[in-house]
Image: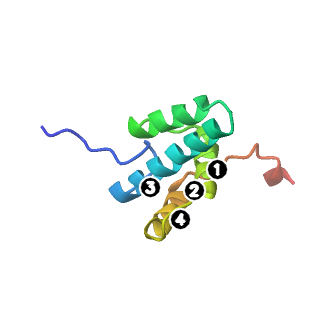
């Protein structure tokens, strides 16, 4: 039996290329947080979950969205950034808007 290959976090359907772009975006985000004297702990947790194919919770997805929005993607990666954004599960709401 051959080992299963993972392409990014569980529950987010990404190609191998998109998984690499996601990794690069979050890694760059970690570097920016450290450069701004912030704590990279949350971002490092997200990076670890991406690398281990673990699922991302809502707070993790918020970190990913922030990383993608600030990622200085090279031209070749811009389509992948948009594909990753589209693949992220939608942000949940508390349902208040639907009760109006």
Earlier residue among tags 1 and 4: 1
Residue 26 image position (x, y, % from top left):
52, 45
Q: Circle 2: is it few (<14), some (14-19), or many (20+) Cα within 10 Å? A: many
As measured in the structure, the alpha-carbon distance from the residue carrying label 2 to the one carrying label 1 is: 8 Å
Q: Which residue is mark 4?
A: 82
Horizontally, residue 73 falls left or right of residue 90, namely left
Tally the numbered discs. Answer: 4
The structure residue drawn at horizontal position 56% and vertical position 40%, both measured from the top left corner, is 30
Q: Which mark is residue 66?
A: 1
Q: Which residue is mark 2?
A: 71
As measured in the structure, the alpha-carbon distance from the residue carrying label 2 to the one carrying label 3 is: 10 Å
Earlier residue among tags 4 and 2: 2
Rendered view: 2 above or below 16: above
Earlier residue among tags 1 and 3: 3
The structure residue drawn at horizontal position 44% and vertical position 55%, both measured from the top left corner, is 21
Q: Secondary structure at mark 2?
A: loop
């Amino acid at each position: 039996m051959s080992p299963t290959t993972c392409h990014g976090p569980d529950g987010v359907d990404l190609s191998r290329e998109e998984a690499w772009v996601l990794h690069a975006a979050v890694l760059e985000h970690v570097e920016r947080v450290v450069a701004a004297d912030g704590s990279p702990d949350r971002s490092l947790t997200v990076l670890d979950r991406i690398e281990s194919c673990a699922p991302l919770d809502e707070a993790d997805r918020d970190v990913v969205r922030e990383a993608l929005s600030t990622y200085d993607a090279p031209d070749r990666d811009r389509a992948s950034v948009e594909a990753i954004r589209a693949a992220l599960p939608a942000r949940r709401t508390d349902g208040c808007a639907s009760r109006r």
